[in-house]
Image: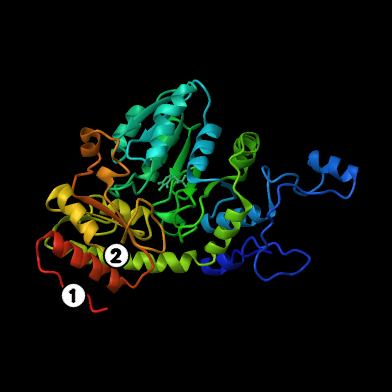
Amino acid sequence: MDTSDWGLATRMVHDGTMRSQFGETSEALFLTQGFVYDSAEEAEARFAGEAEGYVYSRYGNPTVSMFEERMAALEGAEAARGTASGMAAVTAALVAALKAGDHIVAAGALFGGCRYVVETYLPRFGVEATIVDGTDLDAWKAAVRPNTRAFFMETPTNPTLSLVDIAGVAQIRDALAPEAVIVVDNVFATAMWQHPLELGANVVVYSATKHIDGQGRCLGGVILSSKEWVTEKLDVILRQTGPAMSPFNAWVMLKSLETLPLRLRTQTASAEEIAEAVAGHKAVKRVLYPTRDDHPQVELARRQMLKGSTLVAFEVDGGREAAFEVENALRLVKISNNLGDAKSLITHPATTTHQRLTDEQRAEQGIGPGLLRLSVGLEETADIIADLTQALDAAAGMPRMRSAG
Ligand SMILES: *Cc1c(COP(=O)(O)O)cnc(C)c1O
């Protein structure tokens, strides 16, 4: 059935559904490793790829397929593959794109695991890596070599929400390294607010653990690209190395996609209001939110993102001590390094997610001791703002307002 006329919210409820002979309303969970065949001839035909059907859940599973098809609809991609985690998605996508003797250019501001894969793991297998300042297109350009076969970036970046110009990197690829694939980790922007494939990227990856699950339950990942790249480059890696998504996790996330537009619209509207409220507090030195007028790359943000998404970063006066005071004074917002949850979560990157970097590397990425990163949840916006305000008041040594509740 062609569903392309439907709006996104409709497609996130219906796309990809495959009903069994029982006609269930809600998608079934096929928690099975294998599949049985009616005859020896049928088994032979499926293994030969001559008959349709599943053979083993490392290769494919009906619940995982439903999740993949709904994800492809969300992204506007020809094909999607689920994986066990976001890191499994990133690793599989890069392994599929590269071989010994190839070169990759990547932005330095990356999720810790992604940076390890690019900088430490790939070179062990003979792939050269150049790390650049992702905000500087000239640096991307200067890093290209005759053997460059991949570009990798995350935008907005964690935790300072700086941006990479995806279309700009695509122009560099087209001019200097047409064989290279651009892989974008689109976790922070989400599929709702940024469409890397339309901007010239070849492959999009997600940690589905974040907004796609959206309620802090399961780990998962997704890789999206053209049908050709997925079937010719990626499938063999997934099948033979085994980073398969659990059908249970796929089922949870398939159901989550039904509410993804609803959740992201609410959380994003809330984040915009919260950024404004926090920016107005006297304990706050600066706020970083992509689509705000005071973001250093606001023009690019408005060009390449539909909305600023659900994360807000801000720097408090008084460094680490003040940042810790804010965190410890919060009552509603929880301290956690995770993000994209229904619960609002705050983290102090310098002492958690970015603890292992040197002071110099942190300074390079703009991660000061007073920086906090907030992932906006689904609570009432006014409650989140009230909680942040009383905590910032405490850090600024101001008398705290009593909570009305
Ligand atoms: C969380 C995250 C990952 C890794 O995903 P996991 O599901 O934890 O393996 C990769 N990139 C970004 C931007 C992330 O936020």
Q: Would residue 293 be visible to someone looking at this image?
A: no
The numbered mark at residue 272 is: 2
- For residue 92, the mark is none
Quarter holding the C terminus is bottom left
Q: Residue 286, position in %: x, y?
A: 17, 54
Q: Nearer the viewer, residue 8 or 304?
A: 8
Around disc 1, counting alpha carbons within 10 Å, would you say few (fewer than 14), some (14 to 19), or many (20 or more)? few
Closer to us: 201 or 60 = 60
The residue labelled by disc 1 is 402
Q: Amino acid at mark 1?
A: Arg
Of all residues, the one furthest to the bottom in this rendering is 404
Horizontal relation, residue 236 to residue 10: left or right: right
Q: Is residue 297 left or right of residue 42?
A: left
- Residue 328 pos. (x, y %): 23, 58
Residue mark closest to the camera, 2 vs 1: 1
Q: Quadrant of residue 386?
A: bottom left
Location of residue 315 in the rendering, given as x and y in whole percent from the top left corner: 19, 52
Instruction: State which tag comes first along the sequence, 2 or 1.
Output: 2
> Please, what secondary structure does the residue beneath circle 1 have?
loop
125 relative to 260, above or below: above
Q: Is residue 65 visible?
A: yes
Q: Residue at x 90, y 43 (%)?
A: 41
**112 displayed left or right of 207:** left
Q: Is residue 158 left or right of residue 195?
A: left
Q: Residues within 10 Å of mark 2 (few under 14, many from 20)?
A: many
